[in-house]
Amino acid sequence: MNFFLHIIVMIATTVPNVLGFNLLFGRGKIFHFGPLGVSIVAAYGIFLVTIATDSFTLGIAAGLLVVSLASAFFAWLSLRLDADGFGVMSIAVHLGLLAVVLNWSSLTRGALGIPRIPRFVFLDSTLDFALFSTVVAAVWSYILWKIDKGPFGRKLIALSEHEWHAKSLGIDRPQVHLIAFLLAGIGALLSNVLYPQYLYLLHPSDYGFPGFVFFVTVVVAGGPGSVRGCLLSLILLSFLREGLRFIPMAPDILGPLRLILFGLILYIAVYCRRDLLFPKQRTV
Amino acid sequence: MRKFFTLSSLLALSLTACGAGDNGPIKLGMISALTGDAAAIGADQLSGVQMAIAEINAAGGVNGRQIELIAEDGKCAGADGATAAQKLVNVDKVVAIVGGLCSGETLAAAPIAEAAKVIMLSPSASSPDITKAGDFIFRDYPSDAGKTKAIAKYFADEKYSRIAILSENTDYSQALRASLKKDLPEGAVVFDENFDPGTKDFRSLLGRLKDAEYDALVSNPNSDGVNAVIVQQFRELELPGQIVGTDTMDSVVIAQIAGEEADGVMLVNVPTAGEGTSFEADFTAKNGDPKSSIAWAAYSYDAVKVLAQAFKAVGTDGMAVKDYLYSMQPYTGVIGSFHFDGNGDPVGLSYVLKKFDDGKVVTVKPLPLE
């Protein structure tokens, strides 16, 4: 039961971050490859301040501030650069932020990570975490679903389909981008206020490129832009990933096999979704 | 698409649900990096654990019970370490876990083992943070805190007062770096640079060493292969001073790659970690050459043997095994003779100064700690 609850926690703590990424990459077709860069900012912002002041309120406030700044910076970059250029730049920013965390060891403890992360007083057992993180994930999913289905979602779609014509209809691209990045940033904040608490550990190795590949797999397999599809694919892929641990095979074969299988899923998903991922621009 | 989701969900849930075990054999868990950057070390650890279990089982098992290994991939990452621990503890119901490999995955898995009163015995996590990870958390791999005291003693003996440190940006190397800086006199570190994992060209970093006045360079990467490259390029640039390494320098790979340029390199490590012993011969006969170093297999092998000794003496109850481990007499294994202190860290593993001489690692002198 605890293992099942653990998987629920891992899924629920990932939901806000993945749905935020889906809003940008899936719905907005913005080649944002640095969502884990924002996550690093969120996690270290929250817990460095929380540990220093012994106050979660101050920690979360600090996290919100730095996440807003990081999101605004990414939004600004997305407006200044072409889609491809922004993709490359967002990777560079992610790696840059990771390098800061790894090398500013007097503040972040670098590659050692920060152990004994404090927890909310009401989060003690795995069950507590499963319930609370599921509620947070459900509320956030509903909010993003409403936003996605509302005027803002339509503006984002319009900009992704044909920017000039969207602008001619009065859609303010800088404003839409800023809001979208801020929403994704809040998703990163929600995920990262819970995830290190659950592990009792904040470690930079959890914010590397493999984590981002999993995000892309979830969004592509679920159908770019679809909140429901992303939720389903996240649940399915997480259970599949951990379920594969139960295949009775030699461990030295099973480990690489799981990686190969995930590579295959990503390949098939991208192939099947290529029209949604890289749509032909509308001609009017 | 709906059919795909339904079928896949059923497959995933059925795979997740089919992990029930029986109470016949003693179930021993293992968390190591079976994939990822540290997979070579993980492969050696797995072979060492399998070798120990095969020997125990061939000799009749523990009180007539065979040991069954359930190994999980922790990938040297916190999330995977925690997931692996959750499965081993709550699904497989293992009685103890050998692992994790890295300090990060060990620290993430430790609270889960601690809450379930399941012993974790790491054969490679070196971070001083592990010391306070919990009452059920042990390791037979020395904490950096002891190792760096031995290095500092060597520097003091040799009157090396200006030290340069070159470290990989991994938790292993950074823990050692932090501990060494703490043990060296103030102002002794005159050059302290980190490099990213995967770096192979150190010429620009080492070039900057020319401008620093130093007596010794501590080469502190995560693997022997990178150490060999650092030694090679250090010699190529004709830099002065002594190169000093630790565990990852204690490998024949250094001499294989760097050739005669490895001669004269010093290192501080435990007296033996299986090199040149019958253990190494048996290991090589069964598994071929180590993927990384025989030491990782040796520490893992001894971890299993210590746990088996505890099971034999007090059974498999977590509390009883914990109490046994804290009070046990020194165990003599491949890596030497050791017991555990009140924090679950190994005591008794002494340190020696070794040297590369004619392509081989030879012991120079012991470095006793007060």
Image: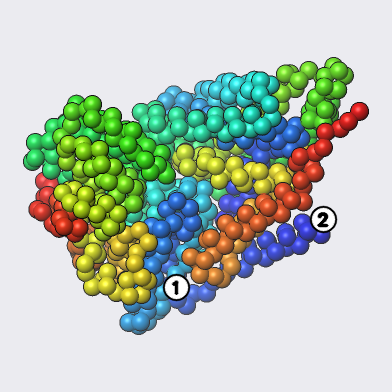
Q: Which numbered disc, 2 or 1, marks the residue closer to the eye?
A: 2
* Residue A67 placement, left or right of B252: right
In the picture of the structure, the residue carrying the numbered disc 2 is B2
Q: Residues within 10 Å of mark 1 (few under 14, many from 20)?
A: some
Residue B65 to residue B266: above or below: below
Query: What amino acid type should be assigned to the residue bearing mark 2?
Result: Arg
Residue drawn at (71%, 27%) of the image: A180
Q: Residues within 10 Å of mark 2 (few under 14, many from 20)?
A: few
Tell me residue B272's x, y (percent). Answer: 20, 61
Residue drawn at (51%, 51%) of the image: B80
In the picture of the structure, the residue carrying the numbered disc 1 is B68
Query: What amino acid type should be assigned to the residue bearing mark 1?
Result: Glu
Residue B122 visible in this rendered orientation of the protein: yes
Which chain is mark 1 on? Answer: B
Distance of label 2 from label 1 (alpha carbons): 40 Å
Residue drawn at (67%, 61%) of the image: B12
